[in-house]
Image (tube, helix red, strand yellow):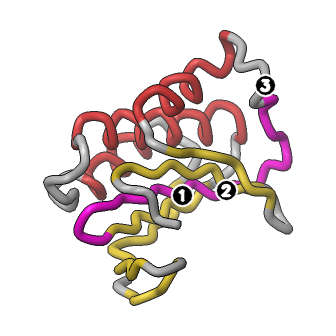
Amino acid sequence: MDVDTSRGENRYRMETERDYPPVSESVRGVRQMIEGRLPDTVPADEVILAASELATNAIVHAKTAFTVRFIRNSSTVRLEFADDSEVVPDLEDLDESQHGLRIVDQVSDRWGIEPTETGKVVWAEFGEATA
């Protein structure tokens, strides 16, 4: 799906939104969705690593199907992983079981967790600030 949306002063073009089942093969599917669509201004290896970790977290911890939104403009990428689990990790104390979130914290420029009516969205951004 391609859709134009706006966030703040920057324009984004939503490249892709896909649903995945909570199985290990979904990690590869997420990587394939992102590869080749990244602007030159973001570190491709780090974006793909973060996407792999967020997909793995959705599978291992949320244990629900999840939706991935890949949003980009010419210099910024935003990944959003939505699941139906209301369990939110303690961001003040990322322990060993949250190894993937520590990696996301290290490789992304910004990231966070937003509750939704049915669960949560874990997001990560790469590139210049968007707000």
Q: Residue at x 52, y 40 (%)?
A: 54
Circles 2, 3 touching at the beta carbon (< 8 Å): no
Tag in front: 2 or 3: 3
Residue 27 in percent (x, y) is at: 41, 41
Dot 1 corresponds to which residue? 80
Q: Is residue 30 left or right of residue 120?
A: left
Along the horizontal axis of the image, is 78 left or right of 49? right
Q: What residue does disc 3 label? A: 92
Horizontal side of 93 relative to 106 (left or right) equals right
Q: Position of residue 45 (x, y in %)?
A: 24, 35
Mark 2 Cα-neighbour bin, 10 Å: few <14, some 14–19, many ≥20: many
Amino acid type shown at disc 2: Val
Q: Amino acid at mark 3?
A: Glu
Q: Is residue 91 magenta?
A: no
Q: Are marks 2 and 1 in contact (CB under 8 Å)?
A: yes
Q: Residue 92, image x and y in percent?
A: 78, 25
CA distance separating discs 2 and 3: 18 Å
Q: Which residues are magenta?
A: 73-90
Instruction: Identify the residue position indicated by label 2 in the image.
Output: 121
